[in-house]
Image (cartoon, rainbow, N blue to C red):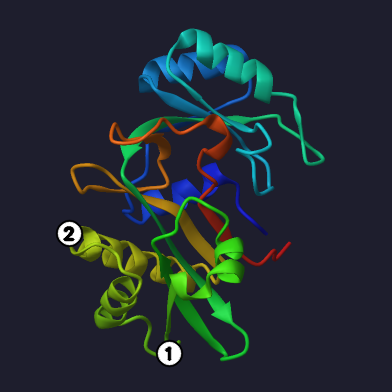
Amino acid sequence: MKLHEYQAKSVFADAGIPTPASTLASSVDEVVEAAEDIGYPVAVKAQVHVGGRGKAGGIKLAEDREETEQAAEDILGMDLKGYTVETVLVEEAVDFKNELYVGVTMDRGEGKPVAMVSTKGGVNIEEVAEEDPDAIAREHVDPAFGMHPYQARKVVYDAGVPREVASDVASILTTLFQLWDDSDASDIEINPVMVTEDDEVRTNWSRRQASTASTTSASTATRASSVTVPDWS
């Protein structure tokens, strides 16, 4: 069972991982009200279980009320890869300079969980794995002992994460692994983990390109944090 983005973020927030201000909405009026409460800019994000929502028009950035209304009208009710969008997440946006990826999954071949970190966040990590596998650092973890702090630091440094934020990213990865273990998840990831101009680490906040580069278009807005757990129903 794959959790929706808003559900995954609730899990992360409960674990102490910093998450953006966000509100679930199912009508244009609710979207506008949420955006006004959160403060502009915001992202309006379709809540469906598909990848590539941004490229498909399911995520839009809005700088003011008018753009928010338009985004809500465009997304609510749209058909997104066979799914009708009934709810959206209205989320605070943030400026960034770097995007990272952190995740944990089970390596079936090794019979062990593997923690993964990459400086190529904000894009489809499966494509990165296929096109540039060396861009993803990996660290296998003994399930009997869990992830040691040195392992989190090692995989973060192996990935080339800047020293200024390496400790914070390692802390997020450690928490992520604990969530993966406690929830008996098959996969858990945050994509992207953002680094701001002030070297603050933000997890999966909707993105606005920092002033040193061009503005991010809505078509490349962030994909979801995700947690996949067994369906015991």
Q: Quadrant of the N terminus?
A: bottom right
Pick the residue in front: 38 or 192. Answer: 192
For residue 98, above or below residue 47 = below
Side of 94 where 2 appears, left or right: right
For residue 181, above or below residue 39 = below
Residue 29, percent from left and from top: 57, 11
Query: Tag on residue 131?
Result: none
Can residue 186 be seen from the camera position used here? no
Image point (57%, 90%), residue name: 111
**Among the two numbered marks 1 and 2 on one chain, the one whose residue lies closer to the N terminus:** 1
Judge depth for marks 1 and 2 and give the one in front: 2
Image point (47%, 10%), residue name: 65
Side of 77 where 169 appears, left or right: left
Q: Mark 1: which amino acid?
A: Asp
Tell me the SS state at disc 2: helix
Tell me the SS state at disc 1: loop
Local packing at callout 2 (Cα closer than 10 Å; few below 14, some 14-19, many 20+) is few
